[in-house]
Image: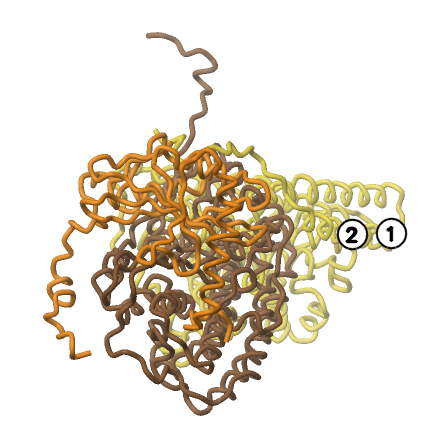
Chain colours: A orange, B yellow, C brown
Amino acid sequence: MSPEEGAPDAAADDAARDYLETTIWAEVDRALSGITARPVTDEEERSVIDLVVRVPPREVVTALRALRDAQGMNFDYLRSLTAVDYEEEGVDVVYHLYSVETRHNVTVKCRLAADRLVVESATSVWRAANWYEREAQEMFGVRFEGHPDPRNLLLPEEMTDVFPLRKSHPLAEIEVLQGEGIAYEEGEL
Amino acid sequence: MNGDIFGLEINIWLDALVRLGLAVALMTVVVMALIYLERKVIARFQQRLGPTRTGPAGILQSPADALKLLGKEDLRPKNADPWVFELAPYFVFIPIFLVFVAIPFAFDWQIRVLELGLLYVLAVSSINIVGWVMAGWGSDNRYAMLGALRAAAQGISYELPLVLALVAVAMVVSLPGDVRGSLNLVEIVAEQGHIPYIVWQPLAFAIFYIAMLAELNRTPFDIPVGESEVVGGPFVEYSGIRWSMFFLGEYTALLLLSLRGAAVFLGGWAWPLGEEVADQNAALGLLYQFTLTAAKAGVLIFTIFWVRATMPRLRVDQLMAFSWKVLLPLTFAQIAANGLVLVYGWPDVVLLAASGGGLVLLAVIIDRAVRRPTPRPGLPSGGLEGEAVR
Amino acid sequence: MVANTPEQEFETRELLINMGPQHPSTHGVFRMVLGVDGEVVTDVVPYIGYMHRGAEKLCETMDFRQGVGYMDRTEYLANFNAELSYVLAVERLAGIEVPERAQWIRMILCELNRLSSHFMFTGAFGTDVGVFGTAFVYSFREREVILDLFEEITGDRLMYAYFRPGGLAWEVPENFETRVHEVLLSARHGIREMDSLLTENEIFLARTKGVGAISAADAVDWGMSGPSLRASGVPLDLRRDDPYLYYPQVDFDVITGEAGDVFDRYHVRLREMRESVRIIEQCMEHLSDGPILPERLPRMLRTPPGEIYERTEAPRGEYGIYLVSRGGNRPYRLKVRSACFSNLQALRDMTIGHYVADAVVILGSIDIVLCEVDR
């Protein structure tokens, strides 16, 4: 059984984590010199297989560009860009990067304050960010400054005041039927 | 002035009307049969059964479709140009039927013997492009417009090789008394009693066949009506009876061009032994000659169906380039070669050699051209999406 | 009245053509507005979102096991691959060990699904290029054979919901191995037929070579993945580069193209199908008896807090599941990273400057599934 299986092989797991948090982080840290980045090592927040790096919102595009252009482990591929809503704690914007050559992953995160959901657009770094940012904008209300085409992507164009993927947005019927335990009790499953 | 039909003497105008009426009625039936056959043939190519439910082996499918189309509402878009939109089907339909006048089915079996029959056929059959453009323009639909313009460009480009390929044959028709050259379709057919012209002019036949596919807007030249691009092209807004008139026109044109090809290149009713059988027994000979014509046209039609089932569609620039850069020069070369043979009185074998060489050249050119990647005609802006959004 | 200058008389204006959302070759409800100058495309503005059903939000309200069904509905041509991404994410997050047999069967089914999806592509692509249904019918015959097998296994032709966090829903039928061999036999035959029907067709070559080319650097910049990226010469295949299941144990080649044009995107897929057949054959050798679910699977699946971005190589490219959990039996946030979403972004870059007819072919060569793009 390979370690990729998520097998509860504690020793291998720790070794992999060690590798992420030392070797890869060292590379990332070198690329991000001058930027206040820190790796997420907290048990509650970290990713199971990737290194997660937190960057302040002001510096995020600088950091992304530095990671893209870094020597050695250049994270030149934007896998995905999305946001996670933590209600009053703010919204995380998450960038999943990949290095095509060295085949390493890194996740860059920045936390936006709930009352100021603005971050610089990454379209200047990757053109791929275009649609992802449009989606995050319409779904979470995060404004990406400098985006060349900030129209709605998936939602109707005039629907600019509703942000469906925020936790505060109700999903009425389904929550009532399934989420809140009407369909089944906890012990039933 | 009186003509006779079936041995009865009647007024010549009435006679023409009767013959034309017979032709139209016959054609409608033949077209329905053709549609049915095409569906069956292509179904076989695609490992399907085709129509099976309507009547035995589905033979009533076409009449059923025709009835359905007749019963459908005749829609006209609000913004369409009413006159142009509604008259367009007639401009496609009528010229095609006029072609009938000069097509020989068997010895002495045609509506009229025209001295310049070939010229008449070619002239009349290119009018229908006007109908296509009218349909495209009148529909006020951008797909229709695009399709109509494509049809016009294609029709004009392929008319030339088509006509010139036939002219090449008309040049070398040898008539009794050592005269060469005729535009009379009856004479052209009658002269092929021993050897059809496809033998002497294979290049002209190949060009004729390709140009015929293009003229008919059949695969691989179905660019004006390309389902996956312009969704039916000029016909996109038509429905019911008007749409079926286009359809009828299309299939009649298919039949007529095949008949023309059979007459000019494959020896029509004359080859093989058409006249000899008729000399023995008039009735049997007539039947035999009809069968010959039908069989030859049938083979051509079958190959057209076959091509349709196999080939993808060309692109509009490739189509134009193929006509102007490949087919047209080769037809000119063919005509020049024929001219030389006629002027210097060389034996007919030279015709075969020149034409055969041209055919090989055509094959080589096509083979080389398709393997070359096409460059992008316009330059990409490379800008982000949305920059050009107004 | 002011007389027009000759320039104004002959002023050419860009014609806008609206393609879709109802159009035979947009492969679903996709709309693009083409600006054309004559036949040359000068601008492309794609519109998506017609199929947006909020699968991500719905999954947040569901038990981990219920989410599998929604994954089916995002990627309806490669459901097993979509399910796989999701169940792997849940398993890794929850630390569930999956029995060996279940993993091998998953691998076989995913590769079979890749075959069926690529058959769908070759057929639909043939239609885009203008073959009157023949390529479509031939490839659908092969796809049908595969779907029959899936139906025998899962009871459904499209929405399988067969993978579970921890393994499989139920055991495969007894004649599974013979049936897979039969399917492979017909698939191999079908690949050969596609080769002779399309790859060797002169007009097909003329229509696809050099059309919609995109360079390796541009493709990476646009975040393209899967065969569309590999056609540009970037050997990125997650089965090899970021291995999951038992892919390190089987031998297969990563197929790449050179020019990154439409023909390469088609040909990479076709050659990839042969590799899939190879992979399945090797998987069949490894298949042994055993359980298909772990012995101790909790009745209520809960995950510790944490997050995971699980990515797998679906037929159309990287299918990623970003799963954030704060504990409990439901995802806190689930993001589906769909391959076509990124690939489709590059459409504008690929299309501008080509002919209208090429726009259709280029769109077809990306092999979009709109349900996956919109989610």
Q: What residue type is labelled 2?
A: Ser
Drawn side of residue B353 relative to residue B119, left or right: right
Residue at the disc numbered 2: B174
Where in the figure is residue C171, as x and y percent of width and height?
38, 86
On screen, A173 above or below A118? below
Q: Which residue lies furthest to the top in this view?
A: C2
Q: How far apart are marks 2 and 1 (CA)?
A: 15 Å
Q: What residue type is labelled 1?
A: Val
Q: What is the chain identity of the residue bearing mark 2?
A: B
Residue at the disc numbered 1: B350
Q: Residue at position x 24%, y 40% from top?
A: A141
Front residue of B71/C87: it is C87
Q: Could you tell me which quadrant the C terminus of chain B lies in? A: top left
Q: What is the chain identity of the residue bearing mark 1?
A: B
Where in the figure is residue A181, as x and y percent of width and height?
12, 69
Where in the figure is residue B8, as x and y percent of width and height?
48, 62
Drawn side of residue C357 relative to residue B119, left or right: left
**Residue B194: image tag:** none
Quadrant in the picture for residue B336? top right
Q: Are marks 2 and 1 on the same chain?
A: yes
Front residue of C299/C33: it is C299
On screen, C339 above or below C275? above
